[in-house]
Image (cartoon, grey):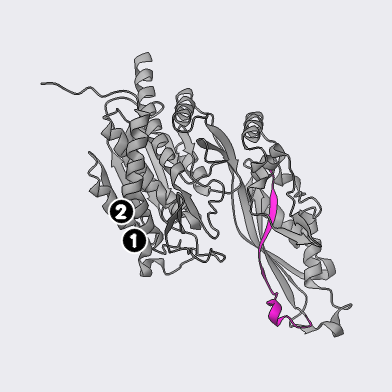
Amino acid sequence: MNTRTPSQQLHTGQALAHISAQWDQQLIAELSRYISIPAKSPLFEPDWEKLGFIDTVLRNAADWATAQQIPGLRLEIVRLPGRTPVLFFEVDGTAERAAAGTTALMYGHMDKQPEFDGWRSDLGPWTPKYEDGKLYGRGSADDGYAFYAGIAAIQEVKRQNLPHPRIVGLIETCEESGSADLLPYIDVLRPRMGNVGLVMCLDSGAGNYDQFWLTSSLRGMTSGTLKVEVLTEGVHSGDASGVVPSSFRILRQLLDRLEDSKTGRVLPKPFHCEVPPDRMAQIRATADILGKDAYARFPWVHYECDGTPYAVLPATTDPVQALIGRTWAPTLSVTGADGLPPLHSAGNVLRPFTALKLSVRLPPLANAAVCAQELKTLLENDAPYQARVTFTTDGAADGWNAPASAPWFQHALDTASHAYFGAPCGYIGQGGSIPLINLLSQNFPHAQMMVCGVLGPNSNAHGPNECLHVPYAKKLTASVAAVIAAMAQAGRHEAAAN
């Protein structure tokens, strides 16, 4: 009887060909169905349980994966009382011992951001459209694709009969609401996860679509509503202005305590931290790769004045400073307002109050809880004119700085990137916050963190015209398969050395 001996390394050409075909024949259609279901996160849809959309997308995903008939794959939808459900799956590993652990954990989420305005006239958040290699619709890139890509990667490793570690997957439905339900599920499922040596989170970004990108850091954040009250009701501005101080003017003075309005620099020291030397080296390397795309990739306003064309200028045209500014510098954004009537109904009234929603991004190593308290004290104390000033905090989340990469992991990423993109792996910090990454890092402190994703230029997650760059997603899927295989190979070498 002849027993087939499994090869030890992923055949990259075969992997990309099979995975690309699967994307074309199955995954685009499955994701289109996913896009059409408004499975908004509980923060944006309090009636999520009654509507059933979150349950529907999980059942659809589980049914598709089951139909693939992957040997050893077991799936179930797990529910805890009063919490959003998760999809959990597991695949037993081969005999080879995985490096630094025996389990590879795949993470993704299937809840979505709300619709947002400004979609192209022929597009919509719940109307999938595949055009020029891009799949448009809410949740396509953030990150409904992750589960399907992960299963396709496992399927390819199995198809090539490669040794692989134990693989488990945890797909949540509360990520866009801050992942409040994630930790209870980790606690419940931890005994079934085993010794996690690799976490694969496909919910992050890419500097371009020309190489594989590993996320090296994430900013933290604190946010809340700043409200300034001066009157119990609005009064005629001609009668009161000059006597009653404007709530808007007071609010401007308060913001000056936080930010230099000329430069955008956040002023309090607790909001800053030093950029570690290894991150600075990566930032310089990434700046060399991206060049002006580090700042030019945003949808700047272009206009004409007296026949002369103009465009809004970025805060910096130095690629290094642009990368530092969006990943390691604190920033203030005003994301909403209240007390201001729409322009068409704005009469000559001195308004009783003004309220602004503030979002402060924090460096990866800043203490978010300390910054949140500092922000409240800074804005509320010693209010001009003794106006009633309140800052209601929405919460705070620490940032994240990736742990050092093990040699096998770094080699696997570079090998995959060269194989599928012809370029080395790039390292880039993300300016957004993904609180779940800290949860995963803290719960699996010895694991390698493969935080990556498809949110590259113009993917526009959370905004209008969100799209998934399918050619990049195909190569990312193949890269996931390559790293899974490399983990088993590293484990075998480690076992031999011991």
Q: Is residue 37 left or right of residue 305?
A: left
Q: Is residue 266 left or right of residue 417?
A: right
State the residue in front, 137 or 61.
137
Question: Is mark 1 in CB contact (under 8 Å) with mark 2?
Answer: yes
Look at mark 2 in the image and give the residue it sits on: 77
Quadrant of residue 408 in the image?
A: top left
Residue range of the region highlighted in magenta in the rendering: 329-349
In the picture, the disc for residue 55 is 1
Farthest-out residue, right: 242
Give the x, y percent position of residue 367: 64, 45
Is-magenta flag for residue 347? yes
Image quarter (top left, top right, bottom left or bottom right) of the C terminus: top left
Give the x, y percent position of residue 183: 44, 49
State the residue in front, 178 or 384.
178
Residue drawn at x 51%, y 28% as measured from the top left: 405
Q: Is residue 189 visible?
A: no
Please tell me how crowded label 2 is: few (under 14), some (14-19), or many (20+) other residues with Cα within 10 Å.
some
**Kind of residue at badge 2:** Ile
Q: Is residue 115 left or right of residue 366?
A: left
